[in-house]
Image (tube, grey):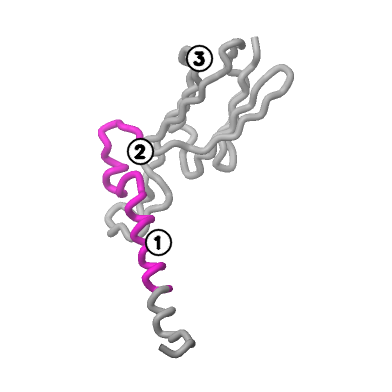
């Protein structure tokens, strides 16, 4: 063995690592495109959330880009705030072959446990720039 590395082997290692990462991303997807669209009402993804507490309220901000305003529902249930909805698949992609799925489609749901020592009522709500803003007024 010479003390120098063969550049060919490192190219092969880099190629295998890239290939492994692609396979891992595909494997870790929650559902394929068709499965996420046809889950018979089951949830296929959950939107990310930010929560900001103020003196008289709590603001909850959900990221749901591409979801039409009519496809988002909010409700207080017991001690939980629940947001549900549907992100439709764009018409341009409906009959294509799935190559990469990083943007989830289909039904979504997110449940947030609210503090047990505080009662809330839904106040102002609005949807803009792909975000849903929910004001929970402290009672």
Percent coordinates x, y for residue 78 in the rendering: 47, 12
Mark 1 / mark 2, whichever is N-terminal: 1
Mark 2 / mark 3, whichever is N-terminal: 2
Q: Give the spatial CA distance, label 2 vs label 3.
A: 23 Å
Q: Kindly report which numbered mark, 2 or 3, lies closer to the viewer in this rendering.
A: 3
Q: Residue at x 47, y 38 (%)?
A: 68
Label 1: which residue?
21
Label 2: which residue?
44
Q: Give the spatial CA distance, label 3 vs label 1.
A: 40 Å
Snapshot quadrant of residue 95: bottom left
Q: Kindly report which numbered mark, 1 or 2, lies closer to the viewer in this rendering.
A: 1
**Is 131 in front, or is 104?**
104
- Which region of the structure is painted magenta? 14-43
Work out whether 41 lies above or below 98.
Answer: above
Predominant secondary structure, magenta span: helix
Label 3: which residue?
79
* Horizontal arrangement in the rendering, residue 37 relative to residue 46 (left or right): left
């Amino acid at each position: 063995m010479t003390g120098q590395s063969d550049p060919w082997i490192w190219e092969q290692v880099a190629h295998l690592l890239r290939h492994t990462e692609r396979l891992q991303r595909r494997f870790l997807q929650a559902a394929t495109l068709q499965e996420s669209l046809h889950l018979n009402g089951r949830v296929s993804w959950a939107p990310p959330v930010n929560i900001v507490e103020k003196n008289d309220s709590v603001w909850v901000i959900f990221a749901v880009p591409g979801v039409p305003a009519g496809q988002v529902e909010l409700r207080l249930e017991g001690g939980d705030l629940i947001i549900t909805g549907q992100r439709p698949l764009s018409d341009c992609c409906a009959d294509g072959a799935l190559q990469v799925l990083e943007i989830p489609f289909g039904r979504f749901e997110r449940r947030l446990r609210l503090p047990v020592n505080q009662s809330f009522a839904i106040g102002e709500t609005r949807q803009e720039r792909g975000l849903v803003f929910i004001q929970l007024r402290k009672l």
